[in-house]
């Protein structure tokens, strides 16, 4: 292996990116795989000496994501690992998510790709490599159409910027963990950074944003975030997330999903069923790109071993075909591969959603039952269920309600999106609504299937973009809830695939907060939870004849 470190590569605006190159010691020209991120190129070199680590190993490091250097080089590729601008050995300033407040990672990817193509050892056939951030910038770079970028292989990318920080309008803390190294990884290798908010707004407007955010009880009752907003220059990159709870231009600029329709080269997407963890954004981006494309929807849990060694074989089959001209058979296979949990088998498809879906409704009924038949009685006789959730200032206990179906009489596959339409009244102006679906076996053991999140003040729907079983919330503003009013909320359930075996039951759990330490939470890095509701709130759940609260789920007919 030939290793050349700390090369300074010029970008179009004159700044230079720090780059390391690992390539085979051969005389013939070779293709290359390029990686760029803010995590620091030096830590990626640990893949040369550290065996792959999966959670819960203490040596698992979430930022070692650029791939196994030995495997890449041994397979006949150059492996180029670069620091984003303002990071590690690179010049310039890192500004906002994916540098969207500055030059933009996509432009830097374009310039880096074209520089690599000019190197004496490169044959001009270039792809990209890496998961998570590394995957996202592949789409941003491909949208810039660099001539020598021939294909991409994007695993676990965060393509919908707003969904990276907010699920259904509820703040998710994972971006903080990755940026600051609070969640079992090293965080960003910061050199020079600025918040995107600092660039877009005047000092007076910036302070107005901060003061407005501090009025939110969810923030005001979370002392750590009060501290961050009072001293904003210490955590600029995370404050961009804190200060922008609504979707719109701030998030759309720099979002890979926004520019995905400009991607025309072959694109392979992989993502693990993550109960909302980047899955929907990956599917939406897959559907939007214009070129040859493939999609793998892989088994849970979402956190791959590092450096995602488990997916390298498929990556090499893809790149050997597109960069080396070797017929690996990969293009003879179905466009989409779906892992059906519960059955633990793969199913093939040519499009998502599957055209054969038959929608089935499961209605909330008294005595915590789910039924395929709606409730015939009025609220006078079918009284609402309810729970009271005290805020995190006084309790760590999470209250919830559960409803369970009868046993399935035959194996029943559900693959697709889902929705939970629920009638709720609360005695405050806002709350979180968190729905989780479980597959319960005859012994009572639960298997987590999918989840849905909605901040009550974000309940507005765009009917023109909503579909059966898939509600669309624009999340462009917060509308306070009139206390005591019964409102129907359409909670989107993230895509999933599960075979409910005969004798199993489906269980729905509804809460406004979630456990920080249950077995599913343990599969994610620390701090990867949703901000709890800061209000003391009583929730009444109506499920009578006039208020048919129900699940809408995608059944796949057995013949398919």
Image: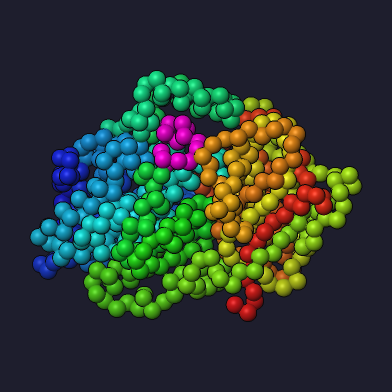
Residue 539, given in percent of the width and then of the height, sits at 74, 38
Residue 331 appearing in the image:
yes
Q: Is residue 325 left or right of residue 428?
A: left
Look at 62% across and 59% down and name the residue there. Answer: 468
Look at 27% across and 70% down and name the residue there. Answer: 322
Residue 307 appearing in the image:
no
Q: Is residue 100 left or right of residue 243?
A: left
Residue 237, given in percent of the width and then of the height, sits at 38, 34
Return the residue nearer the eye: 509 or 61. 509
Q: Which residues are magenta?
A: 238-251
Q: Is 97 above or below relative to 329?
A: above
Look at 66% across and 40% down and name the residue there. Answer: 512
- Which quadrant is the C terminus positioned in? bottom right
Return the residue nearer the eye: 543 or 229. 543
Is-magenta flag for residue 286? Answer: no
Q: Quadrant of residue 319?
A: bottom left
Return the residue nearer the eye: 461 or 48. 461
């Amino acid at each position: 292996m030939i290793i050349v470190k700390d090369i300074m590569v010029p970008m179009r605006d004159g700044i230079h990116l720090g780059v390391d190159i690992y390539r085979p010691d051969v005389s013939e020209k070779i293709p290359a795989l390029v990686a760029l991120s803010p995590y620091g190129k030096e830590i990626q070199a640990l893949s040369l000496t550290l065996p792959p680590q999966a959670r819960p190993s203490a040596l698992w490091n979430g930022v070692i994501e650029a791939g196994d250097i030995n495997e890449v080089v041994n397979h006949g590729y150059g492996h180029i690992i670069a620091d984003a601008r303002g990071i590690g050995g690179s010049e310039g300033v890192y500004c906002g998510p994916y540098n969207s407040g500055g030059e933009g990672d996509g432009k830097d990817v374009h310039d880096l790709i074209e520089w690599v193509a000019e190197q004496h050892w490169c044959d001009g056939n270039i792809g990209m490599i890496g998961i998570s951030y590394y995957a996202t910038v592949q789409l941003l770079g491909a949208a810039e159409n660099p001539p020598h970028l021939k294909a991409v292989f994007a695993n676990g990318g965060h393509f919908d910027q707003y969904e990276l920080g907010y699920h259904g309008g509820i703040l998710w803390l994972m971006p903080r963990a990755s940026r600051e190294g609070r969640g079992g990884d090293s965080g960003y290798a910061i050199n020079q950074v600025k918040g995107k908010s600092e660039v877009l707004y005047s000092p007076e407007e910036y302070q107005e944003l901060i003061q407005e955010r501090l009025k939110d009880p969810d923030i005001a009752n979370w002392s750590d975030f009060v501290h961050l907003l009072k001293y904003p220059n210490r955590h600029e990159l995370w404050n961009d997330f804190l200060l922008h709870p609504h979707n719109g231009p701030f998030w759309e600029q720099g979002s890979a999903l926004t520019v995905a329709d400009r991607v025309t080269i072959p694109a392979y997407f992989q993502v693990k069923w993550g109960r909302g963890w980047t899955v929907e954004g990956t599917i939406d981006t897959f559907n939007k790109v214009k070129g040859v494309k493939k999609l793998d929807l892989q088994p849970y849990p979402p956190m791959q071993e590092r450096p995602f060694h488990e997916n390298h074989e498929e990556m090499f089959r893809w790149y050997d075909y597109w960069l080396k001209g070797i017929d690996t058979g990969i293009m003879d296979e179905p466009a989409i591969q779906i892992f059906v949990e519960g059955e633990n088998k793969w199913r093939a498809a040519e499009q998502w959603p599957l055209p054969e879906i038959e929608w089935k409704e499961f209605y909330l009924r008294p005595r915590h039952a789910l039924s395929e038949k709606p409730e015939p009685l009025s609220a006078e006789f079918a009284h609402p269920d309810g729970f009271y959730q005290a805020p995190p200032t006084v309790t760590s206990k999470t209250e919830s309600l559960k409803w369970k179906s009868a046993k399935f009489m035959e194996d029943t596959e559900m693959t697709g999106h889902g929705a939970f339409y629920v009638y709720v009244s609360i005695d405050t102006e806002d709350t979180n609504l968190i729905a989780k679906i479980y597959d319960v076996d005859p012994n009572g053991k639960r298997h987590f299937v999918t989840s849905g999140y909605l901040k009550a003040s974000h309940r507005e729907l765009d009917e023109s973009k909503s579909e059966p079983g898939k509600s669309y919330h624009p999340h462009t503003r917060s509308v306070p809830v009139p206390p005591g009013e019964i409102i129907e909320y359409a909670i989107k359930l993230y895509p999933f695939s599960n075979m409910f075996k005969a004798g199993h039951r489906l269980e729905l759990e509804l809460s406004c907060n979630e456990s920080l330490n249950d077995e599913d939470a343990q599969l994610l890095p620390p701090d990867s939870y949703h901000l709890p509701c800061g209000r003391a709130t009583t929730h009444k759940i109506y499920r009578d004849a006039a208020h048919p609260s129900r699940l809408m789920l995608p059944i796949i007919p057995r013949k398919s």
